[in-house]
Image (tube, coloured by chain):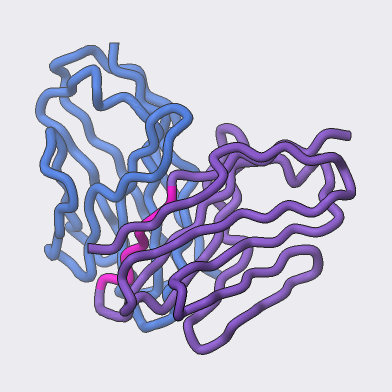
Chain colours: A blue, B purple
Amino acid sequence: SQTIHQWPATLVQPVGSPLSLECTVEGTSNPNLYWYRQAAGRGLQLLFYSVGIGQISSEVPQNLSASRPQDRQFILSSKKLLLSDSGFYLCAWSSGRGSYEQYFGPGTRLTVT
Amino acid sequence: GENVEQHPSTLSVQEGDSAVIKCTYSDSASNYFPWYKQELGKRPQLIIDIRSNVGEKKDQRIAVTLNKTAKHFSLHITETQPEDSAVYFCAASRQGGSEKLVFGKGTKLTVNP
């Protein structure tokens, strides 16, 4: 069966520091991968998605970037964090073969101080 | 692009009553409509979905209906229980390589014992 992992689970970082969040998927190959951000008490904002290695599409221009160095690995990064980057970051995957179902990882709660 | 509106933003019911959450979408090419349940501090969980070739789908106490002509779909929960209390999100997706979802803003459902 498929499993999605995210780490770290929680993170407290000062303004201006760099960020690296990692997401990996097991039990499937060539998945579609997605990064979402959820501000406290708010909805899900799609940040990036990837349909293959090295293929990244950005949905919202901002202080973040994403990379997909391996088939089942998706990384969210920032060179300098802003206070507004605080939130719950969720990685998700879908099979990319027309099944559409999208499954979320456990998330990383980021607090920028 | 696609826009998904969700109503109501909050809903309070008595245990045993029914709950209905409604969503409308703008892109007539959308053909996949999932619903997610998110408990406090947890990841969103896919609870039911429907594709544009069917009008209704049921799974025990939950059901989803789709009206393609009017471009709206609804989640119905019968015999509500306190453990149904959560935030529910609807979403829409269109056929294509990215399978990306556009989410509604969520409905906070409270089931009072």
Q: Which residue is drawn at 31% across and 56% down?
A: A34
The quadrant of the image that shows the C terminus of chain B is top right
Is residue B25 covered in magenta?
no
Q: Is residue A75 above or below residue A69?
A: above
Outermost residue on the front side: it is B70
Q: Where is residue B63 in the image (x, y as percent from the top left)?
A: 70, 69
Q: Residue at x 35, y 17 (%)?
A: A12
Q: Quick one: B91 or A69, which is closer to the camera?
A: B91
**Dominant secondary-structure state across the stretch colored magenta:** loop
Quadrant in the rendering for residue A56: bottom left
Does residue B65 appear in this view?
A: yes
Q: Quick one: B3 or B88, which is closer to the camera?
A: B3
Q: Position of residue B65 (x, y in %)?
A: 61, 73
The quadrant of the image that shows the N terminus of chain B is bottom left
Q: Position of residue A111 (x, y in %)?
A: 35, 20
Q: Which residue is drawn at 16% across and 25% down?
A: A18
In this rendering, the count of numbered labels is 0
Quadrant in the rendering for residue B57: bottom right
- Horizontal side of A75 relative to A9 (left or right) equals left
Chain part drawn in magenta: B98-104
